[in-house]
Image (tube, grey):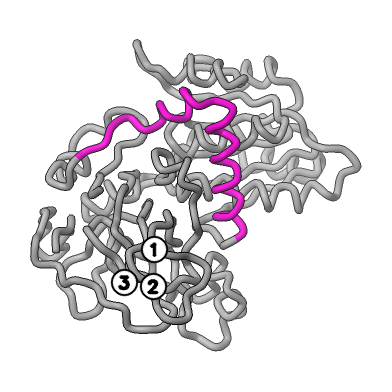
Amino acid sequence: MKAVAVTPNTRQIAVIDTHPEPVLEADTDVLLDMLDIGVCGTDREIARFDYGTPPAGSDYLVIGHESLGRVARVGSKVTRVKPGDLVVTMVRRPCPHPECRACRAGRQDFCFTGDFTERGIKGRHGFMTERVVDDVRYMHRVPPELRALGVLVEPLTIAEKALIQVWDVQDRLPWKPQRAVVLGAGPVGLLGALALIVRGFDTWVYSRTHAGSPVPALVTAVGGHFVSSETSLADLAKQVGNIDLVYEATGAASVSFEALGVLGTNGVFVFTGVPGRKGPISIAADTLMRDMVLKNQLVFGTVNAGADAFAASVADLAKFAATWPKQVASLITGRFAPEDAPRLLTGDADGIKNVVSFG
């Protein structure tokens, strides 16, 4: 069976045709024909061999964790999906430790031990292959009308999980936050901006851009504001007013901590990016700490997502498609054959979201 794989020991990235066919082993298993697999920054970092762990007994790791598949066969106890359904499969699997309260509660996205596995990232093969078998408990059905956009469900879950937590936190206030700044205009940033806009936030996207980029027009078309990073963050804050929420989607520590300095009173700052291995940076620690105390601010990080975020992502993606069909479709820059995957993983990151298609 064809698959796109990285081999860390030899630092190779290749399309292989000898990956074993998956089989149904449990009565809750589902066989999927893979349709679309998104290429993201995590995949590109694995292709640089920054990290990425093959399953036990394998010298290679099949890459890919943003997926859309079609159900081909189901186990005898599967009732939630049926052949022909479109599904998105969750990425993380729980650790085996009895003392991990998060994993035992089905919330492996909050795992205490770090011994979880992740498809296409850590200890489990990913989805960039022709067929996959997984347990139905990790699958979420996608309406057929979202066939062209379903691969965006997983990256959108990053924002959905963040916003679920934001609403829980901001229940402390007798009013709803109104103004949000999104740092970064990649797929995670733009999907986060859409999620904020449908919730009524006055949303500002702050990012680098280049001549001819479609991003500023896209943000404006969906009702947001685009501000180039040539504008200082201090000047951005003057335009926005009191910033209730900063949604960080850059992985750039220097920009992020500078933005933390303009977070408004009673504001929440959400980190979603993971910085690369770089040297230390200087921050105004005294000022940041003073503001967090005197302005009732909160800072938290979020990674991976639970079932609630996947369900919210499917629902929101349907809203996006109904409200902004052209703009949402434009987030997917191109679909490519599996043979193009090594180039997509190692070349320049052109466009917004590139997708490897098997079906």
Closest to the observer: 262 or 113?
Answer: 113
Q: Nearer the viewer, mark 2 or mark 3?
A: 2
Closest to the observer: 322 or 16?
Answer: 322
Does 133 appear in magenta? no
Mostly what secondary structure, the magenta segment?
Answer: helix
Residue 283 percent across, percent down from the top left: 55, 39
Q: Residues within 10 Å of mark 1 (few under 14, many from 20)?
A: few
Residue ID at (21%, 51%): 47
| Residue receiving disc 3 | 123
- Measured in 3D between alpha carbons, the distance from the residue under mark 2 to the one under mark 3, in whole angstroms, is 24 Å
Q: Is the C-beta separation of discs 2 and 1 under 8 Å?
A: yes
What is the magenta range?
A: 308-336
| 132 shown above or below 261 | below
Q: Residues within 10 Å of mark 3 (few under 14, many from 20)?
A: many
Residue 282 percent across, percent down from the top left: 50, 39
Q: Is the C-beta separation of discs 2 and 3 under 8 Å?
A: no
The image quadrant of residue 347 is top left
Amino acid tagged 2: Val
Amino acid tagged 3: Gly
- At mark 2, the secondary structure is strand
Q: Residues within 10 Å of mark 2 (few under 14, many from 20)?
A: many
| Residue receiving disc 2 | 74
- At mark 1, the secondary structure is loop
Residue ID at (35%, 55%): 69
Amino acid tagged 1: Pro
| Residue receiving disc 1 | 83
